[in-house]
Image (cartoon, grey):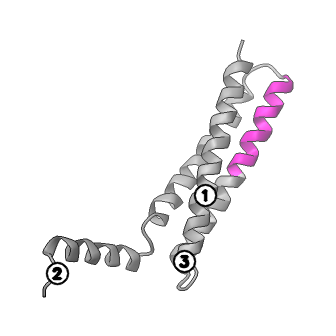
Amino acid sequence: MTEPDASRASRDAEAALQALGGGLSAHILPASATMIGVCMTVLTIGHLGPRGDLRMLVDKMLAIDALVFLVSALLSFMSMRARRAGRRYETHAETVFIAGLGLLALGAMVLAFAIT
């Protein structure tokens, strides 16, 4: 019996994507790098406003968040380079990336309430 063309094409496309370095990691790596830039931009813009305890909290949150996105980018890169443990690195990269997004959203909420 022959396999339907649609499922064979889907399997071939997935195999080609894995051969290029992984599915999700190819998206996590550039997104993480972009989010590091976003954190740095917000940190820089935040220094234009008045100083205060809440601003210091947001600064620290954004600095930590930039490091979280850096870890996500590194894990994503490692998943594309690793032969055996690539899938595990990709899963960790995804989890760390989602945590970074959550921390960024929390920072945005604190920043929104800090602006008077």
Q: Nearer the viewer, residue 103 or 40?
A: 103
Work out which residue is located at the far bottom of the displayed protein and give it: 1
Q: Residue at horizontal 86%, vertical 25%?
A: 53
Numbered circle sitting on residue 74: none
The residue to which callout 2 is attached is 3
Counting residues from the start of the chain, the first of labels 2 and 3 encountered is: 2
Q: Nearer the viewer, mark 2 or mark 3?
A: 2
Find out whether the residues at labels 2 and 1 contact each other: C-beta distance under 8 Å. no
Q: Residue at horizontal 65%, vertical 30%?
A: 108
Residue 40 visible in rendering:
no
Find residue 71 and report its horizontal and vertical position in percent.
67, 61
Image quadrant assignment for residue 7: bottom left
Separation (CA) of disc 1 from disc 3 = 14 Å
Work out which residue is located at the far top of the displayed protein and give it: 116
Numbered circle sitting on residue 86: 3
Q: Amino acid at mark 2?
A: Glu
The residue to which callout 1 is attached is 95
Q: Amino acid at mark 1?
A: Thr
Find residue 92 and report its horizontal and vertical position in percent.
62, 65
Q: Amino acid at mark 3?
A: Gly
Find residue 27 and report its horizontal and vertical position in percent.
45, 59
Which quarter of the image is occupied by the N terminus? Answer: bottom left
Q: Is residue 53 magenta?
A: yes
First to last magenta residue range:
52-66
Callout 1 secondary element: helix
Separation (CA) of disc 2 from disc 3 = 28 Å
Work out which residue is located at the far right of the displayed protein and give it: 53
Q: Residue at horizontal 60%, vertical 54%?
A: 97
Q: Nearer the viewer, residue 27 or 34?
A: 27
